[in-house]
């Protein structure tokens, strides 16, 4: 029997005993990386060989979505186990520690079960933690998220370039180093190791060598339509904000430059993912380590005249999600079943034989890890502010805003969501069925700080 299958069986039988018999976990989180990765095929310009290598090692979910299209509440939901309509953490600025008590986080469950629990980089917002939920956490003091002298907004959408930037100038290099060092050590103690990579978060800057594969003159704009917002309700247009970032890029003519810089910054992150994977594959823990890679939400680069996250469309909600469970997942497999990132907490607990805390609202996707094509009746649900939700099935997306206005898209036929079908009577039953998944109660929304 495969070693990790033996470990999983022992873990499930042992409850909280025999921690040394449990599988290890390598937990890779990436900030602001959308579905422009090679194995998802959304953008042929993307070059992410290491993330694609990981996808070939296990199951890649091709219809995975964030719980919230913003950094702080997305991570609070995933790591804390509660959806925003339960926790009240709806937006950036809704301080996650005010919505999640110490001991409730995912890492805390592994610590309680006898794991060595270590982390580096951005797992929670602003690289903050509850120290009591970790055995140790990398001190990032003095390190730079964007490089020395690069302010978070100074390089906003490549308004400036920084030709002297080196790999090691960015905190992600050191976060990867921290994890590599621990992956290379032999130990009988099971570990939960979290590697949080900050890039491609703004500023869109990377060492200049990462631009070489993306010549500006060869950059293609994403598919888009000038009239794309004509059939969208006012609440959706307000989220898109076409008079903000998009108007600036149209005026400046730097739309392609922004895409070039985003692709280059993604390539920098892919390099660090590769370094971590190399350390695992060449180290003593390859055969008994579960890997999960996720990104906190998507990112728009001009589709629907929208930039950044903060919306409920495909580009802002869809994320890469990859699982490798030796002995369970089939190498190079894909699942088109709709899942959201709330599934990660309960899935890892189940795989490690840990009790899933009662407050956790997600559903384990272990059945899909065993059989990517297994029957699956749940949609993915994304929330952006109280009363604003998107429900994604295998074929459709339904959006309802707080004012009751709606959007409906047939994604199987309209992948860029150009035609809003919410007013088409032929789709009334589809819309009604999807609306049944919307929350019946939502906690009040406080003003973001």
Image: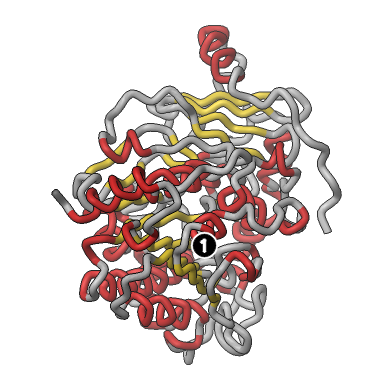
Q: Is residue 143 above or below residue 338?
A: below
Q: Quadrant of residue 438?
A: top right
Could you tell me if residue 221 is visible in this image? Answer: no
Could you tell me if residue 77 is visible in this image? Answer: yes
- Which percent across, then down, holds residue 301? 53, 54
Q: Split into 4 quadrants, where in the image is the C terminus?
A: bottom right
Pick the front one: 412 or 370:
370
| Residue displayed at 24% across by 54% down | 4
Q: Is residue 153 left or right of residue 394?
A: right
Q: Is residue 67 above or below residue 165?
A: above
- Which percent across, then down, holds residue 91? 72, 50
Tell me the residue that label 1 is attached to: 111
Q: Is residue 217 above or below residue 421?
A: below
Q: Is residue 433 left or right of residue 239?
A: left
Pick the front one: 212 or 403:
403
Q: Quadrant of residue 260?
A: bottom left
- Which percent across, then down, holds residue 393? 46, 27
| Residue displayed at 48% across by 57% down | 113
| Residue displayed at 46% across by 83% down | 174
- Which percent across, then down, holds residue 337? 37, 32
Q: Residue furthest left?
A: 1
Q: Is residue 144 above or below residue 14?
A: below
The 10 Å Cα crowd at callout 1, few under 14, some 14 to 19, many 20 or more, is: some
Q: Residue furthest right?
A: 447
Q: Quadrant of residue 289?
A: bottom left
| Residue displayed at 60% across by 38% down | 358
Pick the front one: 237 or 377:
377
Q: Is residue 319 left or right of residue 435?
A: left
């Amino acid at each position: 029997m495969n070693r990790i299958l033996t470990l999983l069986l022992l873990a499930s039988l042992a409850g909280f005993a025999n921690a040394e018999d449990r599988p290890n976990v390598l937990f890779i989180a990436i900030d602001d990386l959308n579905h422009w990765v090679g194995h998802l095929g959304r953008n042929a310009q993307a070059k992410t060989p290491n993330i694609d290598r990981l996808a070939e090692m296990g199951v890649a979910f091709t219809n995975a979505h964030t719980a919230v299209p913003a950094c702080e509440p997305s991570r609070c939901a995933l790591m804390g186990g509660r959806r925003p309509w339960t926790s009240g953490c709806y937006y950036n600025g809704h301080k996650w520690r005010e919505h999640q008590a110490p001991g409730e986080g995912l890492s805390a469950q592994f610590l309680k079960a006898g794991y060595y629990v270590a982390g580096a980089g951005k797992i929670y917002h602003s690289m903050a933690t509850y120290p009591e939920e970790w055995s140790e956490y990398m001190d990032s003091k003095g390190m730079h998220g964007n490089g020395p002298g690069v302010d978070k907004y100074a390089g906003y959408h490549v308004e400036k370039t920084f030709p002297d930037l080196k790999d090691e100038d960015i905190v992600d290099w050191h976060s990867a180093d921290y994890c590599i060092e621990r992956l290379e050590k032999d130990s009988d103690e099971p570990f939960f190791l979290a590697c949080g990579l900050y890039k491609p978060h703004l500023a869109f800057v990377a060492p200049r060598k990462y631009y070489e594969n993306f010549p500006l003159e060869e950059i293609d704009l994403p598919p888009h339509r000038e009239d794309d917002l004509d059939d969208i309700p006012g609440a959706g247009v307000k989220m898109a904000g076409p008079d903000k970032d998009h108007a600036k890029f149209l005026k400046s003519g730097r739309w392609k430059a922004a895409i070039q810089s985003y692709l280059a910054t993604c390539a920098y992150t892919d390099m660090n993912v590769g370094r971590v994977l190399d350390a695992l594959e060449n180290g003593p823990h390859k055969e008994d380590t579960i890997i999960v890679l996720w990104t906190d939400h998507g990112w728009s680069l001009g589709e629907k005249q929208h930039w950044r996250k903060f919306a409920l469309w495909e580009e802002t909600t869809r994320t890469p999600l990859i699982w490798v469970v030796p002995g369970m997942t089939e190498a190079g497999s894909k699942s088109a079943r709709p899942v959201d990132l709330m599934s990660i907490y309960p899935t890892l607990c189940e795989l490690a034989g840990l009790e899933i805390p009662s407050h956790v609202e997600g559903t384990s996707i272990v059945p899909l890890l065993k059989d990517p094509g297994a029957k699956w009746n749940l949609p993915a649900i994304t929330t952006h502010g109280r009363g604003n939700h998107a429900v994604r099935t295998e074929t459709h997306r339904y959006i309802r805003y707080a004012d009751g206005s709606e959007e409906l898209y047939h994604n199987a036929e309209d992948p860029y969501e150009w035609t809003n079908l919410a007013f088409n009577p032929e789709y009334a039953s589809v819309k009604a069925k999807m609306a049944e998944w919307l929350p019946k109660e939502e906690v009040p929304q406080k003003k973001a700080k």
